[in-house]
Amino acid sequence: MVHCPECAVEIDLDEDEVEEGEILNCPECEAELEVVQIHPVHLNVISEDDDDDDEDDDEDDDEEEEAETDDGDVQDEVVDEEEEEE
C-alpha cells in the first residue's frame, strides 16, 4: 500500500502497473501525484502553487531589471549635473 503524501489516505497501486514519471490523482483529496520511484512505489505531490510562484518570480525579476536600468539613468544625470557645476 502507498499513502498519499498530501492527506495520508491509502492508495492501492501495483508497482508493476505504474511507471516512473506517471501522474496520478489522489482519490481522496484529488492532489496531483507523480510516481518518482516504483520499487517500492513512492509518490510526490505536484503543487500547482509552485508553478504560479515561478511565474510570479519571473515577473518580479523583469520588474527588478527595469528598476535597475532606471536607477542607472538617474545616477548618470546626477553625475552630469555635478560636472557642469564645476
Image (cartoon, helix red, strand yellow):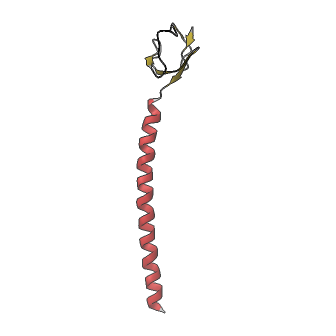
Against 75, is 51 above or below? above
Q: Within the image, what quadrant is residue 30 found in?
A: top left
Residue at the spot x=42%, y=65% of the render? 69
**Residue closest to the eye, 11 or 21:** 21
Q: Is residue 85 above or below residue 53?
A: below
Percent x, y for residue 37?
A: 55, 20
Q: Which x, y percent locates residue 18?
A: 47, 13
Q: Is residue 77 above or below residue 4?
A: below
Residue at the (45%, 63%) spot, across then down: 68
Give the camera-side residue of 42 and 66: 42
Of 16 and 74, the residue lying toward us: 16
Q: Residue at x 46, y 15 (%)?
A: 26
Relative horizontal placement of residue 9, taking residue 59 as reference (left or right): right
- Where is residue 6? Give x, y as percent: 53, 20
Q: Position of residue 39 (x, y in %)?
A: 58, 14
Q: Quarter of the image for the N terminus: give it.
A: top right
Position of 25 relative to 86 (above/below): above
The picture quadrant where one finds residue 67 is bottom left
Residue at x 47%, y 23% (from the top left corner):
21
